Image: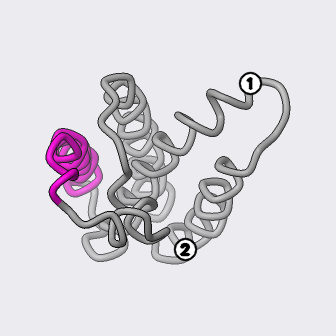
Amino acid sequence: MRKAIFISLLIITPLGFFSKAYTGIGQKWVNDYSGDILYEIFWCLILFWFFPSKKASAIIPLGVFIITSMIEVAQLWFDYVPIAIRSHIIWRLLLGSTFVWWDFPHYAIGCILGWLLLSRIALITK
């Protein structure tokens, strides 16, 4: 099971980074929102690495959605974090930089796709 998770991470992770540098058709959506979907799938896979079970494949995406939604709402108060910290690439990649309502549907899509992927991995590796 971990081999399938690892291979999935090898695909999802670079796609997430490349989504920020994409130029072409639909560039704004790809740059701004496709990364949200891939981010959710990434965290589902990371947690599934540590908790690889059929039951976890159903619980993890819900937990990821709740936590990332809480982080999104917390961005309303990120102005209190010094600019030097907020502008750092690690901060922006992990926690984002601005609150956007439109992120929530993309988080949901990412978690649904994450759930489908985790369920599939759990099913084929039995």
- The amino acid at mark 1 is Gly
Q: Label 1: which residue?
A: 26
Mostly what secondary structure, the magenta segment? helix
Q: Quadrant of residue 18?
A: bottom right
Considering the numbered disc 1 on the image, is that residue within a helix, a strand or a loop?
loop
Counting from the top left corner in percent of width and height, residue 40 is at: 40, 48
Q: Which residue shows up at 46% across the image and 42% down it? A: 36
Considering the numbered disc 2 on the image, is that residue within a helix, a strand or a loop?
helix
Q: Is residue 3 magenta?
A: no
Q: Label 2: which residue?
A: 6
Q: Nearer the viewer, residue 26 or 57?
A: 26
Q: Which residue shows up at 45% across the image and 58% down it? A: 42
| Depicted 49 relative to depicted 122: above or below | below
| Image: magenta residue range | 55-80
- The amino acid at mark 2 is Phe
Q: Are marks 2 and 1 in contact (CB under 8 Å)?
A: no
| Depicted 79 relative to depicted 47: above or below | above
User: Between marks 2 and 1, how big is the CA–CA gap?
Assistant: 29 Å
Is any atom of residue 67 visible in this view? no
